[in-house]
Amino acid sequence: MFALGNVAGFGAEGLGPMAGAGVGAAYLVLAVLYFFPALYKEALALYRHPLFMLGEIFLVAAVIYHGTNGLRIALFDLFPRLWRAEREKPSVYATLAVTMVLWLPAAFIMGRSLIGHTFLGWE
């Protein structure tokens, strides 16, 4: 029977590139708006759509995860004696915990704005 020995490590390997792709896609949109300023009003209206606002909340999570995971990898590269296979899972969980602690206040503020603009008629 086949079993994955370190599922947390494999999860971190998958989340890192996905977070990086999300951040890169957001930068690409910003670059397009920089070079085509006439699209700014249409883009602003699109960004006020609830699905885009929800996506923006998860984009913030991706940016924070991408940074904390990069810090984890940099620490293992700078101090190779710290890296051991048995430390992989706790380090991934610590990265996710730090990401959640940093992301939840931003998600609350952005989620409040999402609910206010979508359901309460804020302008």
Image (tube, rainbow, N blue to C red):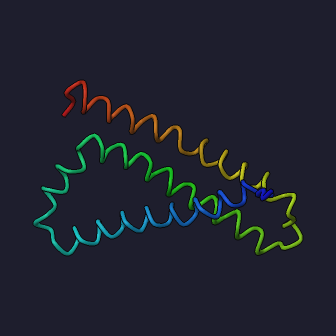
Q: Quadrant of residue 51?
A: top left
Left or right, 32 with respect to 2, comes to left
The residue at 75%/67% (across/down) is 75
Q: Position of residue 97 (x, y in %)?
A: 67, 45
Point out the residue furthest to the front here. Answer: 1
For residue 70, above or below residue 106: below
From the image, which quarter does the C terminus lie in? top left
Question: Nearest the camera: 87 or 33?
Answer: 87
The residue at 21%/30% (across/down) is 122
Q: Quadrant of residue 39?
A: bottom left
Left or right, 62 with respect to 3, comes to left
**Tally of numbered tags:** 0
For residue 90, above or below residue 69: above
The residue at 57%/45% (across/down) is 102
The residue at 29%/66% (across/down) is 30
Q: Position of residue 94 (x, y in %)?
A: 72, 49
Q: Position of residue 64 (x, y in %)?
A: 54, 54
Question: Nearest the camera: 8 or 41?
Answer: 8
Q: Quadrant of residue 15?
A: bottom right
Point out the residue furthest to the left here. Answer: 38
From the image, which quarter does the N terminus lie in? bottom right
Left or right, 34 with respect to 56, comes to left
Q: Position of residue 37 (x, y in %)?
A: 15, 68
For residue 19, above or below residue 35: above
